[in-house]
Amino acid sequence: MTIIVTGGAGFIGSNFIFYMLKKHPEYRIVCLDKLTYAGNLSTLKSVMKSPNFRFVKLDICDREGVYKLFEEEKPDMVVNFAAESHVDRSIENPSVFLETNILGTGVLMDGCRKYGIKRYHQVSTDEVYGDLPLDRPDLFFTEETPLHTSSPYSSSKAGADLLVLSYFRTYSLPVTISRCSNNYGPYHFPEKLIPLMIANCLNDKPLPVYGEGKNVRDWLYVEDHCKAIDLILSKGKVGEVYNVGGHNEKRNIDIVKLICKELGKSEDLITFVTDRKGHDMRYAIDPAKIHNELGWLPETKFDDGIKKTIEWYLENRDWWEEIISGEYQNYYEKMYGNR
Ligand code: NAD
Ligand code: DAU
């Protein structure tokens, strides 16, 4: 079994590669990644020399390069994590989101059609459903919830999902889609809420909470997401969408306070800043389908997962300090300087 994993030098993709190489040592994993600002080769150093692992620096929009790789590797499956993934960046500059997230997905699926494939899996997001009101805790996203996006990022992911489903209907390409809630864990890029707050806390810098911090996200430990995708690859039904989430809703402000507490820092570091444009209020996944049909359940409780995550950032300062010392400084100044 050869699997091409795109975006494997990023947060979830790298965790998926580690999980798959351990769980299925007989598989060959080929990581295809453009190494954008969010991709980091040092993340993959522990597997770089594994005989059943190969890294290829490539853009998923590069049709010729993608076809050449398919010809060389003859993959059985493709799992597409490659994406521009940060909502705030999509508000600043939407076009690269359309290119990578929509056009790149199309190129990968054309490669799958041309060379034949057992499965194309699209890693999507709960953000395609838009948001839920805070005063309706009884409402959840199911696979039947209409797509109703808020940001250029979520719109590009929804566009890709529709394209993937159209390749199933039109060309009978064997596709599956997972739509997961917010992940957290090791190797999470420090532009996202949890790692940004951990890094700032450790550097005694202000903790920029958007708006009033009342927005709710449904947090899932990254390894549980990886397990769900592995299960969908082996047991999922082609043409189907599976929602993945852990029934673990938290307000942003409560997450930030918890990080302060765990790191022994004062909550005085918390600074309320101008809200994100079009900020989604609440995400909440109903994972009944993947539970009932495939037997998936999240295994890591949030209290344990967040402790493990904070521990990881304490033990791996080199990894994130190198990131925040480079181009990230300009990004931070631009996004937070006058907020
Ligand atoms: P990330 O930003 O950490 O990593 C993205 C990776 O994709 C990077 O390694 C980057 O170099 C690579 N990449 C970007 N553009 C590329 C291109 N054109 N060609 C090849 N590689 C390219 O993202 P993440 O948080 O790991 O998210 C991975 C996937 O999971 C995305 O599709 C995202 O939409 C989805 N997702 C993320 C979350 C979350 O909470 N992080 C939740 C649900 C779904
Ligand atoms: O729900 C899945 C999605 O989760 C994924 O599809 C996205 O790729 C991923 O980035 C994530 O999107 P969010 O926008 O929910 O994640 P982010 O970490 O950017 O923000 C989480 C919440 O925290 C959100 O309500 C905005 C808020 N926030 C974020 C940052 C970076 C702050 O209050 N301050 C911050 O500095």
Image (cartoon, helix red, strand yellow):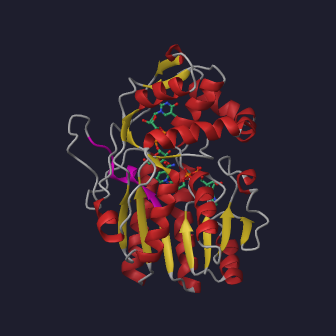
Vertically, is 29 above or below 17?
A: below
Vertically, is 223 above or below 72?
A: above
Q: Observer-nearest residue: 74 or 137?
A: 137
Residue beneath the point at 45% across and 56% down: 157
Q: Residue 92, can we see it?
A: no
Q: Is residue 90 left or right of residue 328?
A: left
Q: Observer-nearest residue: 240 or 115?
A: 240
Position of the N terminus by quadrant: bottom right
- Quadrant of res 60: bottom right
Instruction: List x then y, in percent, for residue 148.
Output: 31, 51
Vertically, is 214 above or below 186?
A: above
Numbered disc total: 0
Instruction: List x then y, in percent, for residue 202.
Output: 64, 25
Residue 294 colored in magenta in the image: no
- Quadrant of res 188: top right
**Among all residues in the image, which is located at the extreme top?**
268
Q: Is residue 127 left or right of residue 6?
A: left
Q: Is residue 285 left or right of residue 31?
A: left
Q: Observer-nearest residue: 140 or 288?
A: 288
Instruction: List x then y, in percent, for residue 252.
Output: 42, 31
Q: Residue 240, can we see it?
A: yes
Residue 125 colored in magenta in the image: yes
Residue beneath the point at 57% across and 58% down: 100
Instruction: List x then y, in percent, for residue 243.
Output: 36, 59
Q: Which residues are magenta?
A: 123-132
